[in-house]
Image: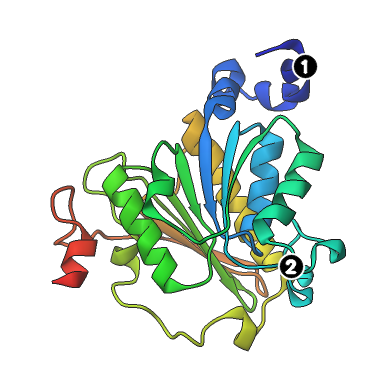
Amino acid sequence: MNDEELLRYSRQIMLPEIDIDGQQALLDAKVLIVGLGGLGSPAALYLAAAGVGTLVLCDNDQVELSNLQRQIAHAEASIGLDKTESAAASINRLNSDTTLVLESDGFSPSLVDGCTVVLDACDNFTTRYAVNDACHRARVPLVSGAAIRWQGQLAVFDFRKPRSACYRCLYREAQDADLDCATNGVAAPAVGAIGVLQALEAVKLICGAGEVLADNILYADFLSMDMRRFTLARLGECDGEFSCANVAKA
């Protein structure tokens, strides 16, 4: 770590849970973010600001006017651009030292290879299951977030640990396909709050700081500011040898 980096990240290095070793771990880390919308936008910006060395940005959509209400990595001038390209420009303005890998063709399990942590910030169950299964097989921790209307949820699946719960333990079957922001609406800061929490959990996983939300799920109702944390039980069939992905296909 050079003098400029020591100065840049000094407020973070002051934290005993991070210190020099933790900051170096962030600089050496590679984080995959699947989805550069309302969740992925703040997560990507905060991870770049925190000093994550490499960000893999995955999204196959383009920026639309309706995105700008909540997807803060994009601007009016970005309309029509790939979200990965737009988000990369915002990240470069914030931290030009961050190495960026852009994937605009959608999620592929190979993107998980070599990653330290993966963030699921997408908006459909098909991709969520695919990301979960790839992380499960590769034993890479997964931070999953979702938000709609005034509510949000956050979960961490630490596949480095044996017998960890996974996304299929939370949702064995796909939920109502109509339960999305396009048909139900969402408060802009609600997705931002969950995206920031995803970034925070990723930093803790990388640095080994504090207690992550592994095998737990946090539900937040931002209208009432009621936040509840529940233990997430692993499905009986799901373990290191026989994953939920295989159970679901059986």
Question: Is 184 situated left or right of 143 in this image?
Answer: right
Is residue 111 placed above or below 148 in the rendered structure?
Answer: above
Question: Is 163 situated left or right of 71 in this image?
Answer: left
Residue 73, numbered circle = none
Residue at 55% across / 23% down in the picture? 22
Residue at 39% across / 41% down in the picture? 113
Name, please, the residue furthest toward the right. Answer: 77
Residue on which the image places disc 2: 70
Answer whether labels 1 and 2 touch (C-beta < 8 Å): no
Towards the viewer: 121 or 83: 83
Residue 4, numbered circle = 1
Secondary-structure class at tag 1: helix
Is residue 81 placed above or below 30 in the rendered structure?
Answer: below
Residue at 46% across / 85% down in the picture? 177
Towards the viewer: 181 or 108: 108
* Location of the N terminus (image quadrant): top right
Residue 60 visible in image: yes
| Residue 217 placement (x, y as % from top left) | 43, 60
Question: Which is nearer the N-term, disc 1 or disc 2?
Answer: 1
Question: Is 181 situated left or right of 74 in this image?
Answer: left
Mark 2 nearby-residue class (10 Å; few <14, some 14–19, many ≥20): many
| Residue 169 placement (x, y as % from top left) | 29, 64
Type of amino acid under label 2: Arg
